[in-house]
Amino acid sequence: MYLIRNLLLLLFLFTVTVWSQSLKAEYRVSFGIFGQVGLAKADLQIEGKRYTIRIEGYAIGMAKRMSKGRKEVHISSGHIVEGRLVSDRYEVNKEYGKKKTIKLYSINHTKREVKKSKKKYRDGKLVFDKNSILDFYAQDDLLTLYFNISKLIDKKEEKSKHLFSAVGAERQKGSVEILIPSIEERKVYESSLGRGDYWYLTAIIYQKIFASNQGELYLAIDKDGITQKAMLKDVLLFGDVLVERIK
């Protein structure tokens, strides 16, 4: 079951309008008939013109047993230019059972080039090691894109469609699509995520782990700029994935 084995829903959860020197948030992940399957933590630290984002997700309960203790950590680090986070390095660590995978992206903005290193370990031994250069360049990785998005989209109440590029999304050639609903369309979001002083949007997800009926992730972002709820509809015929902020 792809979704239980992977809690990467976290990549689409965090949009910050006003940054402080630090930001921490925690989320509960529930999946249809299975109930709560995971927890997620996000941490943004800013020191001068440098930033670090760390997002950690792990399975709990039955999902933990089925996924062999699945845990993922995503770390983005880089610099800040005119209030925008610009990624220099993006790292993805996945662990389950005796297996571990580490992906590291190094972004050279001068050369407009992204180098990728992927290593796989089994029982602590290196079994796969590959280096490559992506066929696209982007200033953002998947984490910084969603922290920057409120600065990239000015009109948050008007129906619109936006296409962005992010390192870490190479399965879709770096493309990430964001849809802003009309006032009339907001009713669909309100019925799924609740009413509030929210900014609603949809992220179009192309990865197999998010195989849902429409492949769309709904988000409700509070006036403080932090996502309060997110929902992926009709996943693998078992129900909806709901992510709720708890801290």
Image (cartoon, rainbow, N blue to C red):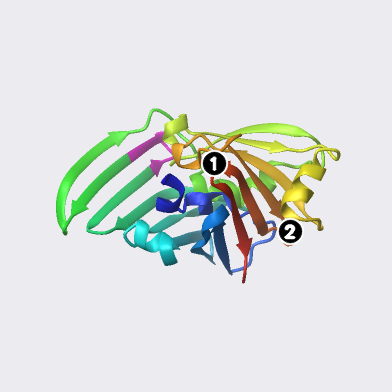
Q: Is residue 171 above or below residue 51?
A: above
Instruction: Please state which of residues 71 and 102 is positioned toward the viewer in this rendering.
Output: 71
- Identify which amino acid the numbered label 2 is placed on: Asp
The residue located at (56%, 64%) in the rendering is 28
Q: Quadrant of residue 61?
A: bottom left
The residue located at (82%, 44%) in the rendering is 187
Q: Quadrant of the C terminus?
A: bottom right
- Identify which amino acid the numbered label 1 is placed on: Leu
Q: Is residue 129 above or below residue 147?
A: above
> SS class of the residue under badge 2?
loop
Instruction: Please state which of residues 97 and 27 is positioned toward the viewer in this rendering.
Output: 97
Residue 60 seen in this snapshot:
no
Q: Label 1: how many residues lie within 10 Å, few (<14), some (14-19) or many (20+)?
A: few
> SS class of the residue under badge 1?
loop
Q: Is residue 82 above or below residue 170?
A: below
The residue located at (36%, 45%) in the rendering is 106
Q: Label 2: how many residues lie within 10 Å, few (<14), some (14-19) or many (20+)?
A: some
Q: Is residue 238 above or below residue 46?
A: above
The location of residue 44, given as percent across then percent down, is 53, 64
Residue 110 seen in this snapshot:
yes
In the rendering, which numbered label is found on residue 29?
none
Q: Is residue 111 magenta?
A: yes
Task: Tell whether 102 sits left or right of 42.
Answer: left
Q: Quadrant of residue 24?
A: bottom right
Q: Nearer the viewer, mark 1 or mark 2?
A: 1
Task: Please count the marks in the image.
Answer: 2
Q: Where does the magenta region start and end?
A: 107-115
The location of residue 73, given as percent across then percent down, is 40, 59
What residue would you read off at disc 1?
237
The residue located at (50%, 46%) in the rendering is 142
Q: Earlier in the sequence, mark 1 or mark 2?
A: 2
Instruction: Please state which of residues 174 and 58 is positioned toward the viewer in this rendering.
Output: 58
